[in-house]
Image: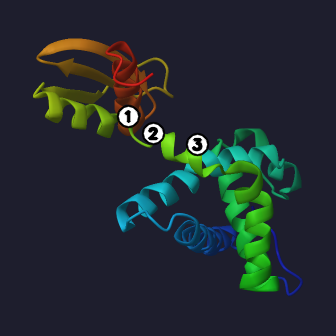
Amino acid sequence: MNTKNDQGVYINFERLEFLGDSVIGTVVANYLYNELQEDNEGELTRMRSKIVSREKLNAIGKELNLLDHLICTGKKELFGDDIYGNLLEALIGAVFIDKGYEQCKKVVFKMIITPHISLHEVKKEIISYKSVLIEWGQKEKISVEFSTAKELSKDTDINYYCKLMVDDKQLVKVREISKKKAEEKAAKRACKIMKIIN
């Protein structure tokens, strides 16, 4: 993304993403602080994590068709899904620089919070199935073990497998593009098999 500003200086979108990420986090934190007055710091932190998750920001950026407005030298179809969230953050960062915090706050509400966030629904969302499964195992005194390793595969996009053992018996085996995604996928499948979640 080698775009220059009016002075001929290359624009660094990653710096805008960094700024936009911080501004979104601040606006959401302030929103939650005001709306959820009975919740403690831990719950507020979990709620903020759900709202500003990479998946959620990617989905919002995609819905806004932000990639259509990107000027770049590379092929847009080669970008992964994270480009949408990155562009959303960069856009918010640019609004903050041009218009200041109060105007930026209005934009965050208009583009993210008002159309996409229901606090009731967010409270029910699960961030990490792995955490849910581990907590369940501790509560029920059942051993839960993730055996994850890199594998050589003809499919170069899928590099990791995860065997999930429950009470020393293999419950599921999955493959994914990263260790984290493999473990989450295995945990989600296991939670559904054992009806820990609906």
The kind of residue tagged 1 is Tyr
Marks 3,2: beta carbons within 8 A: no
Q: Which mark is residue 126?
A: 2
Task: Point out residue 177 in the picture as x, y percentages from the top left corner.
Answer: 46, 32
In terms of sequence position, does the residue under pointer 3 or pointer 1 come before the other? 3
Q: Which mark is residue 114?
A: none
Q: Nearer the viewer, residue 14 or 126?
A: 126
The kind of residue tagged 3 is Glu
Task: Point out residue 3 in the picture as x, y percentages from the top left corner.
Answer: 81, 69
Marks 3,1: beta carbons within 8 A: no
Task: Point out residue 183 in the picture as x, y percentages from the top left corner.
Answer: 34, 31
Above or below: residue 148 compared with residue 18: above
Q: Which mark is residue 121?
A: 3
Near mark 3 (Cα within 10 A), the count class, few <14, some 14-19 or many ≥20, is few
Label 3, label 1: how many angstroms apart (C-alpha)?
17 Å
Left or right of residue 41, residue 96 in this image = right
Near mark 1 (Cα within 10 A), the count class, few <14, some 14-19 or many ≥20, is many
Residue 45: quadrant of the picture: bottom left
